[in-house]
Amino acid sequence: MARTLKPVYDYVTPSCADAPAQLFMAPIIRMQIVRESQAAAAVQIRSPQQAWADCLRGRFANCDREVMVSIILNTKNRVLAIDPVFQGNLNASIVTMRELFKSALLLGAAAIIAAHNHPSGDATPSPEDVLITREMIAAGRLLDIELLDHLVLGAESFVSMRERGLGFSR
């Protein structure tokens, strides 16, 4: 007489009450803004010239590599923070919208002014600067954070992409 073995499955279908125990144990996190230092900044930004003179010129315009900066603003264009988002190399900086807007999201910002320097000292916008401006505008719309301007910084001057109509609709 041949015996056949029947597989035995030793498991119990979890009930709804057991469901939380069956889930992946995800870490619970807390995020906070850490102030690294302070920089002189205008209380309220009223123009690209003021952003350049009060927030950017002395600190970011003459860097030896490309630096992308986000000036984070509230609903009255008051400066909440200045975030040096990226540091690139001599002539390029890889910009991701996620990183550009991260601090603005954490601080509950209404708007940002993006700025980056040209280490050559020439503030003339490149075709890539126009393309990235369009990407920043689109990302800001999705996040409900307005891109007020994108400034290109040179050694002794700057260009407002909005004032020149580069990347911004008129």
Image (cartoon, helix red, strand yellow):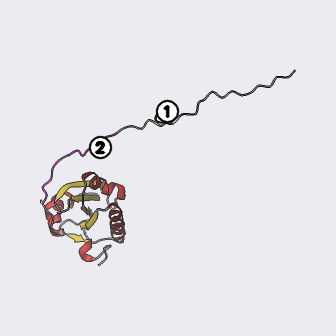
Q: Is residue 170 above or below residue 95?
A: below
Image coordinates for residue 65, horizontal then vertical, percent: 28, 57
> For residue 46, what is the image quadrant?
bottom left
Residue 110 in picture, x, y percent from top left: 24, 61
Q: Which mark is residue 18?
A: 1
What residue do we see at 18% from left, 69% from top? Answer: 48
Using the rendered image of the protein, determine whether residue 94 is visible from the camera's viewpoint: no
Judging from the image, what secondary structure is the residue with disc 1 in?
helix
Front of the two marks 1 and 2: 1
Residue 15 place in picture, x, y as percent: 53, 34
Residue matched to label 2: 31
Query: Viewed as shown, does residue 1 lie left or right of 117?
Result: right
Q: Residue furthest top?
A: 1
Vertical placement of residue 100 versus 162, above or below = above
Foreground pick, 89 / 44: 44
Taking the spot 28% from the left edge, 59% from the top edge, the residue there is 68
User: Which image quadrant is residue 84 in?
Assistant: bottom left
User: Where 73 sits versus 33, above or below?
Assistant: below
Q: Is residue 33 magenta?
A: yes
Local secondary structure at mark 2:
loop
- Quadrant showing the N terminus: top right
Which amino acid type is marked by label 2?
Answer: Met
Q: Report the magenta residues as a range.
A: 29-41
The secondary structure that most of the magenta stretch takes on is loop
Q: Give neighbour class at mark 1: few <14, some 14-19, many 20+ (Cα, 10 Å).
A: few
N-term mark: 1 or 2: 1
Q: Quadrant of the C terminus?
A: bottom left
**Quadrant in the rendering for residue 162:** bottom left
Q: Front-most of 103 and 151?
A: 103
Residue type at mark 1 is Asp
